[in-house]
Amino acid sequence: MTDFYEILGVSKDASKDEIKSAFRKKARTLHPDVNKAPDAEEKFKELGKAYETLMDDNKRATYDQYGEDGLQNAGFDTGGPFAGGFGDLNDIFNSFFGGMGMGFGGGRPDPNAPQEGDDIRSDIEISFEEAVFGVKKEITFEHLETCPDCHGTGAEKGSKPITCPTCKGSGQIQHVTRTPLGSFAQIVTCPDCNGKGVKITSPCKTCKGYGRIEKEKKIEIKIPAGVDNGSRIRISNEGDAGTNGGPEGDLYVILHVKKSNYFKRDGAEVYTKLEISPAQAVLGDEVVIKTLDGEKTVQIPAGIQSGNTIKLKGLGVPYISRPDRRGDHIIVVSVKIPTALNDEEKILYKKLYELNTNKKYQSSIMDKVKGVFNNA
């Protein structure tokens, strides 16, 4: 599941300046002229798509609620600024950074700084009709919540974490290896605090020193009209609790839509099949068919051919970002040829055949044949 925020390395409430800064930093390391990995160009394109989406207020709002599926359903171009190909990569890079040099840098984040909780996923199944018209659903999921007894510190009441004496709170130490060629220094994770920078001498009995506990939760969500199989809905702040006072992650609900035995869907259009007799095809008729809105009377035009379609405008699936508009219901007509005829039917079909190949028969024969079809 692609996450544009994760690609850029920013939080979901990041400002445009923060997004731009993150893009510049990542682009320097992913630019194919610098990064020779075989997938560097593809990752650079993904980075550009994420940047282009999150810098556009309308696209960002749609993406936050419905993900990439919502962007496509709303008609937004999701190719990103590099969808048409890179061309001269240096020119593209310079157009973003004004010819600035490709600097590299960065450092290890503060282990005691607030960290956002992880996003979590919940899969649910809904019916075809619920996907078309929307529905409210109660879902149950498990996530990590801040421990109510230690308030996330992991320490027993009356105590608090102490600064790790080994790494002095940095979460890392310098490890020196002596070799015949000399001494080599390497920065490694502190083994005493596992990179946290703090130690808990009296762990909380409720959370065993983790600061978070796993709990089951029930919430009601609103599934909008027009969702499709594989669509996702983002529920803010329902993911895992953050650490060191950081915000919660998000819950992503993935929808699995049951197939309909009658309707076939393609985007906002729905298709159904209709079998008619040769007489109905030749003379036309009125038939009652099932639509998403109930039964409707449909006029079959005279002379329709097998494989032709009849379109019922506005009776398809609502557009997810424009629920006041709907696609069409398309009826695919199939002329069913009879395989078992009685003697009278055989005579009539024979006369029709002769009539179509020999024009000398009298008009009374035609009148009789029409009468038979009209009474069929």
Image (spheres, grey):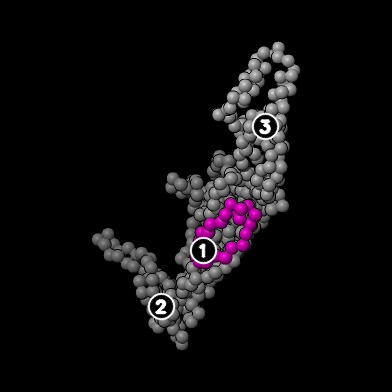
- x and y percentages locating residue 262 in the rendered image: 58, 45
What span is in magenta? 117-141
Magenta span has 134?
yes
Amino acid of disc 1: Asp
- Residue at the image position 61 percent from the left and 31 percent from the top: 335
Check if residue 247 falls in the magenta segment: no
Picture layout, residue 127 above or below residue 236: above
Which residue in the protein does label 1 denote? 119
Which of disc 3 and disc 1 is earlier in sequence?
Answer: 1
Q: Which residue is mark 3?
A: 376
| Circle 2: residue type | Lys
Question: Foreground residue, 335 or 58?
Answer: 335
Instruction: Please tell me how crowded label 2 is: few (under 14), some (14-19), or many (20+) other residues with Cα within 10 Å.
Output: some
Q: Which mark is residue 208?
A: 2
The residue carrying pointer 3 sits among few (fewer than 14), some (14 to 19) or many (20 or more) residues within 10 Å by Cα, namely few
The quadrant of the picture occupied by the C terminus is: top right
Q: How many marks?
A: 3
Which residue occupies the foreground of this view, 28 or 369?
369
> How much space separates mark 2 and mark 1, taking CA atoms?
23 Å
